[in-house]
């Protein structure tokens, strides 16, 4: 039977009950899952930016004929990049698993955990359909109207769907602020950073109103700020989760 003294030695609040009081980690699997998220970020650079040539994004003012010509010239590269992105972007779920585990550890009643879990599942459905739009675009590189429509749809799925991800960042921040353990999984500055990261994606909500300027889907605010903010957030959370796993390992071994 686990005593209160043992629980304190493990860095857990002795008033916890059930599995939370017996919280343990699997460092190898958790680190592997965190690395899967960094692989997602890397494939975004390789598949999305290089192979698909979506960085910098094409202009929303591009004519249907110009869009068709551009896609036709890069059809094979777009299809390969989209296939790779569809696979690697699916790692969103595995990457979030260790973070969700820490969110569960932070609270006594798993309200935030349930909200975050539902959010991650919904986000996965969005993420895995983004590259599908561009696949259809390249697959039908014969009809300018279809090409233009699916080019736009891909960027709207990529950027305009930021709110669920922003809400997830806020949930993580609240969990960190309310962490009930004597040894916090994440420092408090990570909570403030998550709130900032959520707010920084808000300009994407205005991209439907503009075809030019900083709020267009190729603009400084709607694309560059949002994309850099999100993937930088993934890197920061990966580094801090690695540190949390290492700290737990040392406490449990010691």
Image: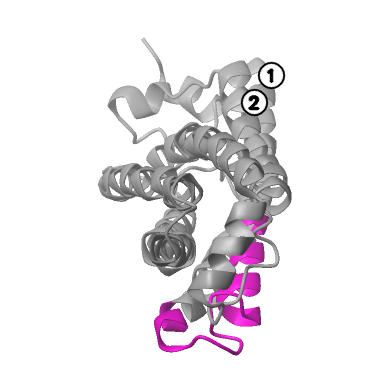
Q: Residue 100 at what x, y percent from top left?
A: 43, 39
Q: Quadrant of residue 9?
A: top right
Judge whether residue 96 is colored magenta. Answer: no
SS of the residue under disc 1:
loop
| Quadrant position of the C terminus in the picture | top right
**Location of residue 43 with respect to 53 vertically, above or below:** above
Q: Identify the residue shown where x is 48% and y is 42%.
A: 181
Q: Identify the residue shown where x is 42% and y is 78%.
A: 205
Q: What residue span does the magenta drawing correspond to?
A: 205-232
- On the picture, is 53 further left or further right than 90? right
| Quadrant position of the N terminus in the picture | top left
Tag shown at residue 166:
none
Q: Identify the residue shown where x is 42% and y is 51%.
A: 133
**Location of residue 222 with respect to 163 vertically, above or below:** below
Q: Is residue 62 visible?
A: yes
Residue occupied by mark 1 = 254
Circles 1 and 2: CB atoms closer than 8 Å: yes
> Which of the two residues, 23 or 85, is positioned nearer the viewer here?
85
- On the picture, is 133 further left or further right than 195? left
Tag shown at residue 251:
2
**Mark 1 → mark 2, Cα distance in angstroms:** 5 Å
Give the prevailing secondary structure in the magenta stretch.
helix
């Amino acid at each position: 039977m686990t005593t209160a003294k043992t629980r304190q030695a493990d860095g857990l609040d002795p008033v916890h009950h059930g599995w939370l009081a017996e919280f343990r980690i699997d460092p190898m699997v958790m680190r592997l899952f965190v690395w899967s998220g960094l692989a997602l970020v890397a494939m975004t650079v390789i598949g999305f930016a290089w192979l698909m040539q979506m960085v910098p994004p094409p202009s929303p003012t591009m004519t249907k004929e110009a869009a068709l010509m551009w896609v036709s010239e890069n059809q094979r590269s777009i299809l390969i990049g989209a296939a790779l992105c569809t696979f690697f972007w699916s790692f969103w779920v595995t990457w979030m698993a260790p973070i969700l585990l820490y969110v569960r550890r932070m609270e006594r009643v798993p309200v935030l955990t349930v909200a975050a879990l539902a959010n991650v599942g919904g986000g996965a459905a969005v993420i895995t359909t983004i590259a599908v739009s561009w696949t259809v675009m390249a697959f039908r590189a014969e009809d300018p109207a279809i090409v233009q429509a699916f080019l736009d749809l891909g960027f709207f799925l990529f950027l305009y769907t930021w709110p669920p991800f922003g809400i997830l960042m806020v949930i993580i921040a609240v969990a960190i602020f309310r962490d009930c353990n004597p040894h916090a999984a994440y420092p408090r500055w990570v909570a403030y950073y998550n709130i900032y990261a959520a707010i920084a994606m808000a300009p994407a909500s205005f991209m439907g109103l503009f075809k030019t300027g900083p709020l267009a889907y190729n603009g400084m605010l709607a694309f560059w700020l949002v994309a850099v903010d999100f993937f930088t957030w993934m890197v920061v959370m990966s580094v801090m989760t690695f540190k949390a796993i290492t700290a737990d390992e040392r406490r449990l071994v010691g």
